[in-house]
Amino acid sequence: MSTDADDTRPASTTAGPGADDDGAHSRRVARAARRGRSRRRLRNRLLQGGVLVGVLALWWLITAIKLVDPLYLPSPQAVLGAFIDANRCLVIDEGTGRTVCGVQNYYLWEHLVASLQRIGVGVALAAICGILLGALMSMWEPANTALAPYLNFLRALPPLGYIGLIIVWVGIGDMSKYLLLFLAAFPPIVIATIDGVRGVREDYISAARSMGAGPPEIARFVVLPAATASILSGVRLAIGFAWTTVVAAELNNGIPGIGGLAYISGTRLNTDLTIACIIVIGLVAVALDGCIRWIGGRLAPWYGKV
């Protein structure tokens, strides 16, 4: 008994240092990988910041030497001033003390919120209808055969091509804007859903069936998780299409709305405010895209890793 105990003790003691060494090595590798990712992110941020500074410097130089008429290209200071004035109240008559707040009776941020609300309604309806129709077309071939040509036809149409018809149908109120944004966001969501559902591996479905899963369980626990990444990519594209359509949607009775404000300020040769609106539209588009990518990373963390 004592011999057996003596034989087992050295084995356990010799295995301990080796395991500790492996764990320490793994931790060193993980730390090195984190440092490498941090350095890459820092380099990327510095590169992006350098390009931004260079563009702003070139813009300032062109306007400072008056290479371009300020009516066509105002200075960065003028654009910043227009942005600030559009978000505060200004006294326009010293004698009576009359003040005007924002532009077109709304602050610029209120114009932005109104456009985001329209985008939200249009894209939400497109997501609900698009996912349902895409799932139907992917699982039932007659529906795909019947509807695919019309889906491609709608996808190819530019929004400005049918905005007049939509106004005739539903008027110039918010309903026309919701419908236009819905039509812009609907096709990419349907196509992404079809690709996602059809891209589910057959062995996953077979494995679920072998364990007794029925169609509802397969759809919920196999097909939907596997297609989530593709669906979110479609929603990401749809939001981009809808956001680029917001100016067209707000050409008529688009106040409040950031697209309508950009259009009206442009027609009135208020170039500094027009450029401020364009910059806001672009920054919000980048922020929305980043939010969708973040949500996609949380809902489908396995995408691209398996």
Image: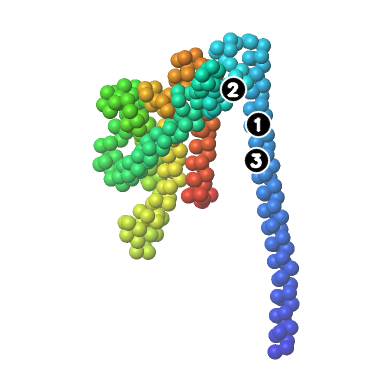
Residue closer to the observer: 270 or 301: 270
Residue 276 location (% of width, % of height): 54, 24
- The amino acid marked with disc number 3 is Arg
- Are there few (<14), some (14-19), or many (20+) residues within 10 Å of tag 3? few
Residue closer to the observer: 24 or 204: 24
Residue at left offset 68%, top offset 58%? 26
In this rendering, is residue 272 above or below 3? above
Residue 303 location (% of width, % of height): 50, 48
Q: Quadrant of residue 80?
A: top right
Q: Of callouts 3 and 2, which one flags the residue occurring earlier in the amino acid sequence?
A: 3
Q: Which residue is mark 1?
A: 49
Q: Of callouts 3 and 1, which one flags the residue occurring earlier in the amino acid sequence?
A: 3
Q: Kindly report which numbered mark, 3 or 2, lies closer to the viewer in this rendering.
A: 2
Residue 61 location (% of width, % of height): 67, 16
Q: Of callouts 1 and 2, which one flags the residue occurring earlier in the amino acid sequence?
A: 1
Q: Kindly report which numbered mark, 3 or 1, lies closer to the viewer in this rendering.
A: 1
Q: Kindly report which numbered mark, 1 or 2, lies closer to the viewer in this rendering.
A: 2
Spatial distance from mark 3 to mark 1, Cα to Cα? 12 Å
- The amino acid marked with disc number 2 is Gly
Residue at left offset 42%, top offset 36%? 117
In this rendering, is residue 281 above or below 136? above
Q: Which residue is mark 3?
A: 41
